[in-house]
Amino acid sequence: MTASIANSADIIGVVGASGNGKGLFVKDYLRRLGKRRPIVVWSPLEETDDYATVIGGEAVTSIAALVAAIKAGKKRLVLVPAGSGKPFKATFDRFCRLVWELPGWCVVIEELSQVTTPSWAPPSWKKLSTAGRHRGLTIIGTSQRPAQVDKDFFGNCSELRTYAVGYKSDAVAMADTMFLDYRDVLKLPKFHYIHRDKAAGTNTPGVVHPPQK
Ligand SMILES: Nc1ncnc2c1ncn2[C@@H]1O[C@H](COP(=O)(O)OP(=O)(O)OP(=O)(O)O)[C@@H](O)[C@H]1O
Ligand SMILES: [Mg+2]
C-alpha cells in the first residue's frame, strides 16, 4: 500500500468497535498521502476527530459551502454534516454526487452505518463504491457496525482492515468478506487488526500505536 499510495485508486474498508484504532489508521494514511492528492472527508465527529488539522485543510458545514470551496480551488476539505435521519442521508447523497465529479481525489467517509443499511444505500454511494475506481478515486469508509452497512461496499474493497467488533454479526460480516474465521475477529486485542489485500488474497495481522501523549 505504501508504495502505491499516491497513484492507486483504492477502496479501503476500515472496521472495528469504538476506540480500536480506525481513526488512527485513516489519519496516518492521510498524513502519508500528504499533498499528493486532493482530499475530502465526511466527518460527523469532527469536533473530536479534527480531520481538518490532520490534512491541513478547512472544515465546512454545508454542501453549498463545500461546492464553493471546491470552486475556489481548495483541495483539502472536511464536510461536517449536520442533522440526523432523512436530511442527514440526503446530505450524504449530495456529497456522493459531488465526489463523483472529483476524479483523482481521496475521499473518506466516517461511519457508513449512519448513511447506509445492509439492504439500502443512496444510488450515488453505490455508484461511488462500485465505479469510483474508474474515476481514479480512492475511497476510505469506516464503520463500527459492518453488519449494518451495505454489502456492496465491503465486497468491492481492494483492502479491508478489521479490528475487534462489538457483535458476532459484525464479526461474521467481516469473516464473509475477508474469508476468515469470525472468531479470529472477535478475539483481536485492542489496536490489533487483520488486513486483507484482495488482489493478493492475503490476510495479515498488525497493530496500530496511538501517539504518545
Ligand atoms: N492523537 C491521539 N493521541 C493519543 N491517543 C489517541 C489519539 N488519537 C486517538 N487516540 C486513542 O487511540 C484510540 C483509538 O482512537 P481512534 O480514534 O482510532 O478510534 P476509532 O476506532 O476511530 O473509534 P470511533 O469508532 O469511536 O471513532 C482511542 O483510545 C483514543 O483515545
Ligand atoms: Mg473514529
Image (cartoon, rainbow, N blue to C red):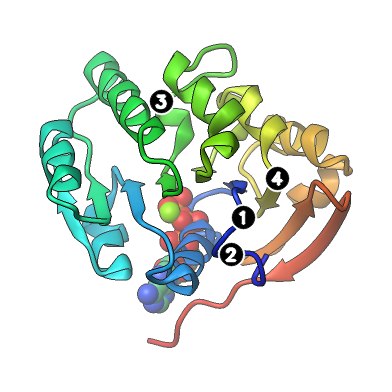
Foreground of the two, 15 or 90: 90
Question: Is the Cβ of the residue at disc 1 closer than 8 Å to that at disc 4?
Answer: no
Report the disc number at residue 115. Answer: 3
Residue in the image at 55% along x and 48% along y: 17
Viewer-nearest of discs 4 and 3: 4
Separation (CA) of disc 1 from disc 2: 6 Å
Question: Is the Cβ of the residue at disc 4 closer than 8 Å to that at disc 3?
Answer: no
Quadrant in the picture for the N terminus: bottom right
Amino acid identity at mark 3: Val
Viewer-nearest of discs 1 and 4: 1
Instruction: Please tell me whether mark 2 sits on a helix, a strand or a loop.
Output: loop
Residue 48 position (above or below residue 97): below
Figure label count: 4
Report the disc number at residue 8. Answer: 1
Q: Earlier in the sequence, mark 4 or mark 3?
A: 3
- Which residue is the site of mark 4? 158
Q: Earlier in the sequence, mark 4 or mark 2?
A: 2
Separation (CA) of disc 1 from disc 4: 10 Å
Q: Earlier in the sequence, mark 1 or mark 4?
A: 1
From the viewer's perspective, tell me whether residue 156 is left or right of residue 121: right
